[in-house]
Amino acid sequence: MTPTAVELLITGMDELHTMDPTRGEGPTGLLRGAAIGFTGGRVSYLGPAATAPEAQRRVDAPGTIGLPGLIDCHTHSLYAGDRAGEFRRRLNGEPYTAILESGGGILSTVRATREASDEALAETLHARLQGMLRRGVTTVEVKTGYALDEVHELRCLRLLKEGRWPQRVVPTYLGAHAVPAEFRQDREAYLRLMIDRVLPQAAELAEAVDVYCDRGAFTLDEARRVLEAGMSRGLVGRVHAEQVEFTGAASLAASLGCASADHLERIDEAGVTAMAMAGTIGGMLPTAMLYMRDVSPPARRMVDAGVRLAVGTDYNPGSSPCPDLWTAATLACLLMGLTVEEALLGVTRHAGLALGRPELGWLTPGGPGDLCLMTPPPGAPARAETLVQHMGGHRAAIVVREGRVVLEVVRGG
Ligand SMILES: [Zn+2]
């Protein structure tokens, strides 16, 4: 029987990592000599090039490495303003608390974001996302949390949901990022505002609710209240956990059925066990760890216990001004001890799980048609390991989103 024609067929890749170990070699499900076809936005053929169906459009891509479209599962990329001055002050030895007291840090980003117009916010975000697309990222999670009031948090969520972005944007409500200056004397009033007023509206616009549970942010009890309020309205739960101080937030995330707990530099053994049992994904954010000059989370211990790890950029203007997911993948290996395969799974399939979107980040017939074909560093062989070994700056030759080519770099020009 002749297979029916597909809309788009890609052949000739040196490697195709499906991220499905049942389909190919090793943990990344590697296929060689493979072709992948797309119809109606989905993968419609995945197998040997020799038996591939006819195609309306056929792209031959020798010298490239095929992967599912990458997923950056943790970013704060919607913000205005600039914090380079703060970077300089911190390098000169000034503590972050002093910077905060002088109106800098996150408070300066909140001020600038509230003041920015929709157009200015959208234009900057679009440019950031376009840069991520060029690196092969087809899904980006974007958190709010730089507005911290009803009007502007909802404005940011509407912008994320309704904007025309280069790739899939997954909006997360992070009103519980910090207590805004005007609520310093009455944090309970801010919690009530989030839970009673903002969350019911945010639940219509966001996919997830996140809480920054840490010293200087929200307590374990406060985090529980916000998460329960959001999750009872159908939002996926996520937590910033155990970064500055141990709070028990990782165990809380596991007990509530959150999709992920991220950072985890100070997670305890009970938290590791709870996350493994609950299937909570551990979000590794090595660029933030580097900028904070922090210790590593016990990544190997977590993997040994059965926790699956995602890797994100944590892209934000203060503690992680790095939008390059490939850099994060390399640093996850160097600073945290992940293997090459764990890093690749961390920016694809496990990142999909961290978003509560298990269909994303791997290639299977009938699954989402998101693919990136990466170009290896000059002179390096077209193998995925070279992309992890060489730090950052990698470019996609072709990016397919929902079965359509959305980026194509003309070769030999
Ligand atoms: Zn974060």
Image: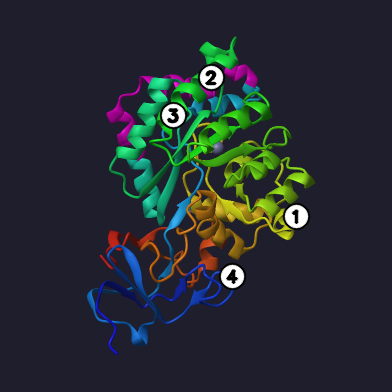
SS state under label 3: helix
Camera-side residue of 287 and 364: 364
Q: Which residue is mark 3?
A: 200
Answer above or below: position of 355 versus 66.
above
- What is the quadrant of the N terminus in the image? bottom left
Q: Is residue 365 left or right of residue 293?
A: left
- Mark 4, residue position: 27
Measured from the top left, where is residue 89 in percent x and y? 58, 24
Q: Position of residue 60 (x, y in %)?
A: 31, 76
> Among all residues in the image, which is located at the extreme bottom?
1
Which residue in the protein does label 1 denote? 301
Residue that extends furthest to the left in the rendered view of this protein:
56
Q: What secondary structure characterizes most of the magenta part?
A: helix
Identify whether 158 is placed above or below 353: above
> Do the residues under discs 3 and 4 have CB atoms within 8 angstroms?
no
Residue sitting at x 59%, y 16%: 188
Q: Residue at x 73, y 42 (%)?
A: 267
Inspect the magenta stretch and tell me whether residue 324 lies in it.
no
Q: Amino acid at mark 4?
A: Pro
Mark 2 is on which residue type?
Answer: Arg
- Which residue type does callout 1 highlight? Arg
Q: Earlier in the sequence, mark 3 or mark 1?
A: 3
Ligand 1 placement by image quarter? top right
